[in-house]
Image (cartoon, coloured by chain):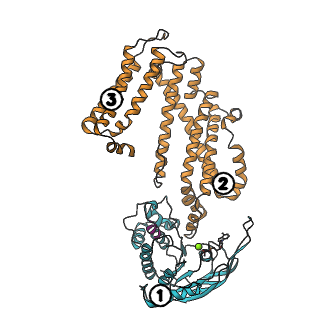
Amino acid sequence: MTETSNLSEEEAPQIEAIRAFFAPAAIFLTLIAQLILPKAAAVTAKSLPWYTDVLLVALVITVALALYHLFTGKAQGFVYKSYFIGGVFLVLGLYNLVTLKFALINPLFFPSPESILNVIVKDWAFLLKCLGYSTRLLLTGLAFGITTGLITGVLIGWYANWSYWLSPVVKLFGPIPSTAFIPVALSAFATSFQASVFLIALSTWFPITILTNSGIINVKKEFFEVADTMGASDAQKIFRVAIPGALPDIFVGIFNGICSSFITLMTAEMIGVKYGIGWYINWQRQIMGYANVYAGLLVIAVSFSLLITIFFKIRDHFLRWQKGIIQW
Amino acid sequence: MVETLGEIQINDVQKIYPADGLGAKTTEAIHHVSATIHPGEFVALIGPSGCGKSTLLRILAGLDVPTEGTVIVDGNQIAGPSRERGLVFQDATLYPWLTIAENVRFGLKLDHQKDTDAKVQEFIDLVGLTGFEEQYPSQLSGGMQQRVAIARALINYPKILLFDEPFGALDAFTRMRLHDQLINIWQKRKLTMVIVTHDVEEAVYLADRVFTMTPRPAILKEIVPVNLPHPRDRNSPEFIALKEKVLGILNFKA
Ligand SMILES: Nc1ncnc2c1ncn2[C@@H]1O[C@H](COP(=O)(O)OP(=O)(O)O)[C@@H](O)[C@H]1O
Ligand SMILES: [Mg+2]
């Protein structure tokens, strides 16, 4: 955000106007290429309007924003992002040339933008259903993993006895990628859903345990002594000093846990679980539906990124007392 | 309300730290110290760095256990830290995740007290930090943080307040302002205060009696009474004479 507010000081108004119109210009160029160049002969699929439509909509929106900026000086956020937005569309246009227009790469494995968009337009209900399944599985696994990770992390970090018995177990089983447990999990649990919940929880549990533990160990000893001189009980020291003090580390642990849960989710879905985005991608790959594979990847990219954004919002709220935390 | 007492009897206290396993031998930090601190008295412990002042103060707080000897507070041998004995460290050790008001409220929360807003405000006002209630510690200067730490300790109505070089990290002007504030609070609340310092002027300015300690292992060398009324004049001949006397005991030529 600070970068955007500095913008007006750094750049003269003319340069700023040029910057604002960079995105619409790039999109316009991409659109012209799509409209005037003929389809490659090697591409046999019939033409679809979606890509052109997206470019048109993007053009209208960015032109409107650029004009709005020109007349009011507002929409600074858009001006700042303008180069990036334009760049994205130029790369997209280039990919369109390479696939649809000149068929320079195998159209079977690298479908054109319009055929990928076509999947989203035609198959959105089923994609959404798959996303729902994935979300349910992921969130259930995360809930178990975060809870158990916090509990073991606090126990090991706080109680010497728990540390004595649990630390070796954590050290032994933690570093094993949870996907290595797939055969065990599939036979140990009644359903593949339960097995996947277990695997996702396992992959989340480890980093959270480790970081909660080290976070608590690194809380300044004086913080506990101050609490002692105010008559704090053990439980009060855990919940009012140890955990809040370890929270920055705990959030790093949860972040690592979420990231490894994504990997586990995708692997679990590609191996055992019915439905879900990972399952969809794997299934489409097997029937050579590469446009669907890309559409699935797009859905994953958007939803995972959304989840991480929500996570960072929560973290920022809890760690608002910290200065200069990493922005997402 | 119960009368605040706060008599401390230090009976032949010795502290030996065990060997650390890295080749270092045992450290005798305190070699048999005995003294009595009267209720409502302001005592300064002064001595060179590393002589065992912090160790003695931590024993008084109940955070460390003496190897030999006992500490009796108002007739009861102390067996650990307690709300009766507050402690203020050199760096304020405020909880960075709590606002100023929440830091001050901390001890009341531990005690499950309800409706504490007025009381918290009273103690924030007492240390002159009205208006900073919702700030976080990192937004405050060192001197302000130290005042919050004092308020956080005072709000529990301890009989005894212990300070371990509380102003050591502050600039001279802030330190002098805080000296006056501290005397003010002490006169209002009539509690026993023990301050560890290596600043002779600070000791003579604040304390009723200055306990001088020798380098390790610490023994109590001499007790210097300061019979000057507050507020004290740092430039008066009596004040300067007392400073020289303490310096002389500590083996520094002025
Ligand atoms: N926890 C400890 N373990 C071993 N030695 C210690 C410990 N704490 C303090 N000491 C030693 O005891 C002596 C007195 O320390 P301290 O009380 O902190 O001195 P002061 O506060 O007067 O500077 C020092 O030599 C110090 O190294
Ligand atoms: Mg010390």
Image marks 1 and 2: residues in contact by CB distance under 8 Å = no
Residue A61 disc label: 3
Q: CA distance from mark 1 to mark 2?
A: 56 Å
Residue bearing the label numbered 2? A156
Q: Which chain is cyan?
A: B
Q: Quadrant of ligand 2?
A: bottom right
Quadrant position of residue B77: bottom right
Find the magenta span and give its range. Answer: B141-146
Kind of residue indicated by mark 1: Ile
Asked if the residue at tag 3 contacts the one at tag 2, i.e. Cβ–Cβ closer than 8 Å, the answer is no
Secondary structure found at label 1: helix
- Say if A182 sits above or below A247 in the image: above
**What is the C-alpha distance between the residues marked 2 and 3?**
54 Å
Q: How many marks are shown on the rendered structure?
A: 3
Image quarter of residue B217:
bottom right
Chain A appears what colour? orange
- Please state the horizontal and vertical placement of residue A93, each as a whole percent of the image: 43, 22
Q: Is residue B34 visible?
A: yes
Chain containing mark 1: B
> Circle 1 is placed at which residue position?
B240
